[in-house]
Amino acid sequence: MTKRMRTANLLLACALTVGTLGVGMSAAAEEGSDKVLDFAMNDDLSTMDVMNTTADYMVPMNVFDRLFEIKVLEDGSTEIVNSLCTDYTVSEDGLTYTFTLREGVTFSNGEAFTAEDVEYTFMHLLSPESINADIALRVAGAEAYMAGEADTVSGITVDGDSQITITLTAPHAGFIAELTAPAMSIIDKTTVEAAENFGIDLEETVGTGPYVVTEWVNNDHVTLTRNENYWGELPSVETAIMHIIPDASTQNLMFQNGELDILDLDYQDASIVASTYQTQYAEQLVSRSRLALTYMSMNANDEFMSDPVVRQAIQMSIDRQAILDSVFNGNGHLENGIIPAGVIGHNDNGTEITYDPEAAKQLLADAGYKDGDITFELAMDSSSSSNTQMVYQIVQQQLAAVGITAEIKTYDQSSWLDTRKSGEMDSFIGTWTMDYNDPANIMDTFFGSVENTVLRSDNYKDTEIIERVAAASAIVDDEERYAEYQALEEKIIHEDFSWVPLYALNHFYAISEDVESYSPHWAGYSDFYIKDVVMK
Amino acid sequence: MLKSIGKRVLQTLVVLFCVSLLIFILLRIIPGDAITTMMGEHANAETIERLTKEMNLDKPFYVQFASYLRDICTGNFGSSYTLNKPVTELISAAFPNTVMLAVFAALIAWVIGMVCGIIAAVRKDGILDRLFMGFSLLGVSIPVFMVAMLLQYLVGYRLHWVDISGVKNWTGFILPAIALGWNSAGSIARLTRSTLVEVLQEDYIDTAKAKGLGQGAVLLLHALRNAMLPVITMMALQISSLLSGAVITETIFSINGVGRLAVDAITSRDIPLLQGTVLFTTVIVIVGNLIADCLYTVLDPRIRKGA
């Protein structure tokens, strides 16, 4: 019996070994196919319809085109270039835009692209089901259409197949920049009108872009295949496979094992980036300075933070450079305002926030606060990366050094968002990445209306300033507009101490030896344009 | 026996009702909701209000629950808020992966665990006993995620024998199944060894030997059959731990399974998907226990005769 047992064990071990060896060979045989780009994303898509998502932009960015796109220049600055629009004019009052559209373009199912598709895109985005409508709300008649009071958007007029006129409710200098946002992806009216499950069904989700989605296996992978009828220059990558890999260490091993061609190092621990990627893979690193701002929010409704002196003391107590150096190995730069570096209108000469804990202590003592008097909650989303968790802890310690108690409370993602949107979150550390390259994007989102300041749990009190922020986007003269934004930044950050601007990080990616070049998204998104990857 | 199975099926229905009620209540008392999570950074009050109405989340609790019960009785589990697909479609796509993983892991856990336990008992205090018990101790002590990462590193990255993650074919289940099954194998091996060692000292074993039966026959016909009862109970209990352990394993090895669906549903407050996955998992655990009970009846005549 014992002998038989031994034999059985041996057989089992052999079977496992042979099985695993067999796989090794098959896995090796599948690799080496050129022009196939493998990359990973943390989460599966919820939809490919931008009307229904504010986060899943990877597929829309590659399957659809917009009227304009943003191009990164060699010096790192950006410019807006024509895409499905070839020319446009603006009326003198800055209200009416007339667009001439590219002719001879077809959707991947063969339907012709016309001005009606552009009109339909706006209507789709403004439909009552949309959760992404805010980007198109400046168009005249948008609100009436959304409310179901009109059958069409009155501010949009189609003139033939290749001309469309869009009228705004008020001048908006950032309108063209807004049209580059992923939410403004142009869809096919004929297909979407007839579709039962647009954004989910692959055959119904067609665009004019360089790629077509050919496979989507939930929680496993999405395959994008090159659109051979693409109107522009055919991209280098023939097939792109987006693997859904929720675990960062698995992604790390897969890249090092040659199973991924692009690794988004944002998901990796900063210490791994420094110890492995900035050393062993230094030649294969690509980076883009994020057009994003990480900030600490302070709720003006809080018992203590309603006092500007406390807010100023908090600003002075945080050693932002130390955080950047210790957590992110110095890979980024400090920010002192609201509009991050790289965004048009950024103020290079704005007031700097100085780290001075002694002065902060003095400020608090002069205002009558004793050590330990000031206590508030620093709310953290449980899905935060290990780096962000470390930032929270450092901020907590730095505040403790001046006698302020910040209690870190962890919420799960959904509760965190819910509490923040209720306006009742004391304080948190957040990051805003630009949707389009115009200061209006970040200024309006945070300080453009009383409702927005509540949604951000900031509860900024100066309504006069809020009105000025809302009005600034209508200033047609760029220099004048930038000056107004910069003045508002000075007031909000350096006079009212509403926020603690922290830093903007560099976004690193590692590329495999099969990739010739890769240009990350202009704003440093994790999503990218596959056409910006060139394979060897 | 049929009567007792019928009784168990009735109990199952009551358990399912209680589980669905509990999950329904829990999802509505915790903070955070599907709509704000779904809308992310672009939120406005009107849209939130409209979607709340559309999803019936503004109706009283009992109305929502009644409508939910009515729907599941007709096989309609609703559509996932976040993945925009019917829950049944999502679960049926993920279920084969979870089953494969659980079956592979159970095979590893139960077959290897029992074989090691038997050898260790027969060779008590010998080298094999110490070796197998050492391995089983490791299996019980090291957390699943740790084993998973070690296997990925050693077998996937260093030896290149299998893919580090994903399931292209059945071989993709090897590493996750070992990671998931090792822990259970350890418990089974230790339990099999201890009960078998105890049984082998019983008088009836000496009687069997005295009758002239060979060692194999004594072990198989007399000792093992009696030693198996607590092991089978443990196996039944392990079904739920294999399913819950699959949540971690599926995430680390990027397998589209029911556990991963459930975790995603929790973080995004995807109520229909979470209810679907929880109910589904509950049914599996109950069925597993039911099978164990039946096996128990077959193996132990005292239970069969109601003694």
Image (spheres, rainbow, N blue to C red):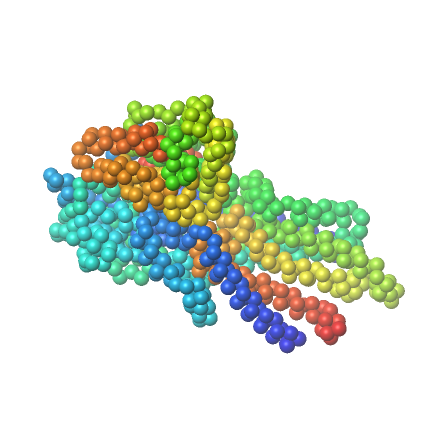
Q: Nearer the viewer, residue B191 or A286?
A: B191
Nearer to me, B196 or B280: B280
Count of marks placed on residues: 0
B113 sits left or right of A82 in the view = right
Q: What residue sits 38% from the left and 40% below the top?
A: A301
* Residue B183 in view in this figure: yes
Indicate the position of residue A342 as horizontal and vertical percent values. 31, 31
Point 24% across, 48% down: residue: A137
Q: Is residue A377 above or below residue B115?
A: above
Which residue occupies the foreground of this view, A305 or B305?
A: A305
Above/below status of A122 relative to A513: below
Q: Quadrant of residue B292?
A: bottom right
Q: Nearer the viewer, residue A91 or A192?
A: A91
Q: Position of residue A153 (x, y in %)?
A: 19, 53
Q: Viewed as shown, does residue B94 lie left or right of A503?
A: right
Residue A533 x/y as whole percent: 35, 38
Q: Indicate the quadrant where residue B111 lies.
A: bottom right
Q: Which quadrant holds the N terminus of chain A?
A: bottom right
Placement of the C terminus of chain A among the 4 image quadrants: top left
Which residue appears farthest toward the front when viewing the image? A368
Residue at horizontal 55 percent and vertical 70 percent from the top: B13
Residue B121 is situated, as x and y percent measured from the top left of the image, at 78, 54
**Residue shown at the point (30%, 43%) measured from the top left:** A450
Residue A5 visible, this orientation: no
**Which residue reaches farthest right?**
B210
